[in-house]
Image (tube, rainbow, N blue to C red):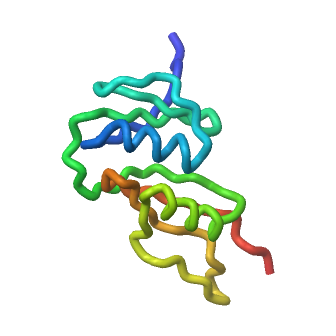
Amino acid sequence: MKVLKVKYALWAKDWERCVAFYRDLFGGEVTLYMEVWSEVVVENAVIGIHGGGEGKRTWTGLSFQVDDLLGFIEKLKEHGGALASEPVDTPEDPMHLAMCIDPEGNEFMMTCPRKKG
């Protein structure tokens, strides 16, 4: 016996909008597309999107490490997403993460490597 895939499951009231959001924001590949279950693959991770959600804000545990956090925050907003709060850049903790919300209310994190010294 072996594990075939690991998936992150999200609920969406508007499943088509949710699929398009993750496909377009992160350059994902849609490998399955139906209301009951769709899959978007981003860097070998499978994001499963299940229609029938309520569209309420929910933490997912989903996180994306990116090379340009500010650039991706701008792109996030262009694709209908939002920030839960503005990222902070301090001498003690250089800006490296942003708490984000997709158009369906699913919260996820975007991070970038911490700046060194």
Q: Residue furthest right?
A: 117
Left or right for 43, reference 49: right
Q: Residue at x 23, y 55 (%)?
A: 56
Which of 21/85 is in front? 21
Left or right for 65, reference 103: right
Q: Position of residue 106 (x, y in %)?
A: 35, 53
Q: Residue at x 46, y 41 (%)?
A: 20
Q: Position of residue 114 (x, y in %)?
A: 70, 70
Left or right for 89, reference 48: right
* On screen, residue 36 above or below 59: above
* On screen, residue 80 above or below 51: below
Question: Where is the C terminus found, in terms of image quarters?
Answer: bottom right
Which of 60/57 is in front? 57
Q: Position of residue 88 (x, y in %)?
A: 55, 82
Q: Residue at x 49, y 44 (%)?
A: 22
Location of residue 27 by image quarter = top right
Q: Position of residue 40 (x, y in %)?
A: 50, 33
* On screen, residue 87 above or below 56: below
Q: Residue furthest front?
A: 78
Which of 92/35 is in front? 35
